[in-house]
Image (cartoon, helix red, strand yellow):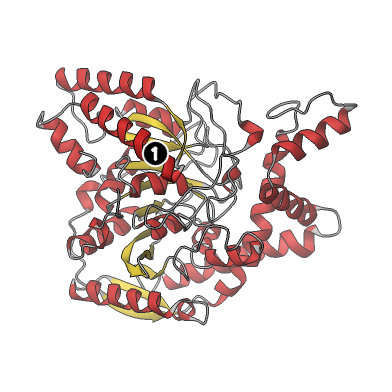
Amino acid sequence: MHQMTLAEIARGLADKKFSSEELTKVLLARITQLDPQLNSFITLTQELALEQAKAADVRRANGESGALLGAPIAHKDLFCTQGIRTSCGSKMLDNFKAPYDATVVSKLAAAGTVTLGKTNMDEFAMGSANESSWYGAVKNPWNLEHVPGGSSGGSAAAVAARLLPAATATDTGGSIRQPAAFTNLTGLKPTYGRVSRWGMIAYASSLDQGGPLARTAEDCAILLQGMAGFDPNDSTSIDEPVPDYAAGLNGSLQGLRIGVPKEYFGAGLDPRIADLIQNSIKELQKLGAVIKEISLPNMQHAIPAYYVIAPAEASSNLSRFDGVRFGHRCADPKNLEDLYKRSRGEGFGAEVQRRIMVGAYALSAGYYDAYYLKAQKIRRLVKNDFMAAFNEVDIILGPTTPNPAWKLGAKNSDPVAAYLEDVYTITANLAGLPGLSMPAGFVDGLPVGVQLLAPYFQEGRLLNVAHQYQLNTDWHTRTPTGF
């Protein structure tokens, strides 16, 4: 049962081959048995899961149907879930039980999903390796000595290890797509505003976006269908009709114009990954796609711009965690200043403190124009590059990451080296575009992803291309040894 995709589970439940309660019990037992190796969960919600599974079975018995009705999933631990710890992977929120459900959580619950638990993540979603979590690092099921990617590493590792078929995740600079690439999954970052951020604890508000992590494009389409849509509670949510993503998966790729940026194939890219990307291009050409070289000239400025904008927004968003309003409070403070300093010093880890300091500096008097304002101008140039490119092509293709997953601890002493691993993913967040990573092969036994980018609200096009690619390749069907 644990090998089934979301689509297969939906068909099995509809055909009464098994019940949601039976499936949920199997997966909960599997998590209990195998997750100690991975550390992919922060909180397991057995009682809630069994309640929801029984309720889903009753709804089906009463004639209801739906692709997500009775489907087991997990939520990244920054989506507020009523009455359940929502920690953001931080000591700061270790004792926080959300008083309400995030819109994503409530929408998926209404669709009938079964919540197995909350997955581990980099602290406040800051990281590319899932090593900054206060609950310990997550391990990559393909090689337990390597990172699973971040910040959605818990969701990725759990799905890759077949502990559950799909999970929610968030992407601020690649935090869905990069873990998907590192763990042989399909991960989709929707257009900014497509999925509500209400109840999703913020890192960088103009960059964060929720999305699905699953084994196939078909499963991502099913989960995104349940997540997407306008939310009046979220001022950044866009009132745009949500298409039937599953219905669009089987469109032909004949004549599809795929742009390949020449800047993607520079000195920083592992040549073995470059070869796998070329193989993916050939597969898509066989399906009728037309390849064209394009240029994204301002891509080289994206990393410095991102690592000014994101920390600046983080320093503002995380100011609420001060020991007074929210979060950890130190013991026996001498005065208000001591309360602030020690509560934040004890509650936040090193990476979060680093980014708060960078952000506060960039926003300070005398440096705002030199850093933050300039970074926002670069952001506009990056967006303009994409708009020009999409006048010539329908989608853009390239590597998701420049290297395969690195060993645990390998980049801990050099944060900038980890930041550089985001070079291909952060541009989509700066521009607000949808992006998808899908399995493309292996290097030294570790998975590699190919990234697709599309114009605004063209998630369906990305899912269509990925689905057609997956019908003609088998990378996404490979399972890590031991799981």
**Mark 1 lies on residue:** 229
Residue 307 in picture, x, y percent from top left: 65, 60
The quarter of the image holding the N terminus is top left
Q: In this view, which residue lies farthest toward the right?
A: 334
Q: Is residue 195 left or right of residue 348?
A: left
**Of helix, strand and loop, which one carries label 1?**
loop
Residue situated in front as seen by the camera: 187 or 21: 21
**Residue at 35% in and 66% down:** 445
Q: For residue 451, which quarter of the picture?
A: bottom left
Label 1: how many residues lie within 10 Å, few (<14), some (14-19) or many (20+)?
A: many
Residue 321: percent from the left, percent from the top?
A: 71, 34
Image quadrant where residue 73 sits: top left
Q: Quick one: 290 or 115, which is closer to the camera?
A: 115
The type of residue carrying mark 1 is Gly
Question: Is 46 situated left or right of 97 in this image?
Answer: left
What percent of the width, then of the height, locates residue 211?
Answer: 41, 46
Choose between 283 and 390: the one closer to the eye. 283
Residue occupying the point 43% across, 45% down:
38
Question: Residue 118 appears at what percent x and percent y?
Answer: 45, 34
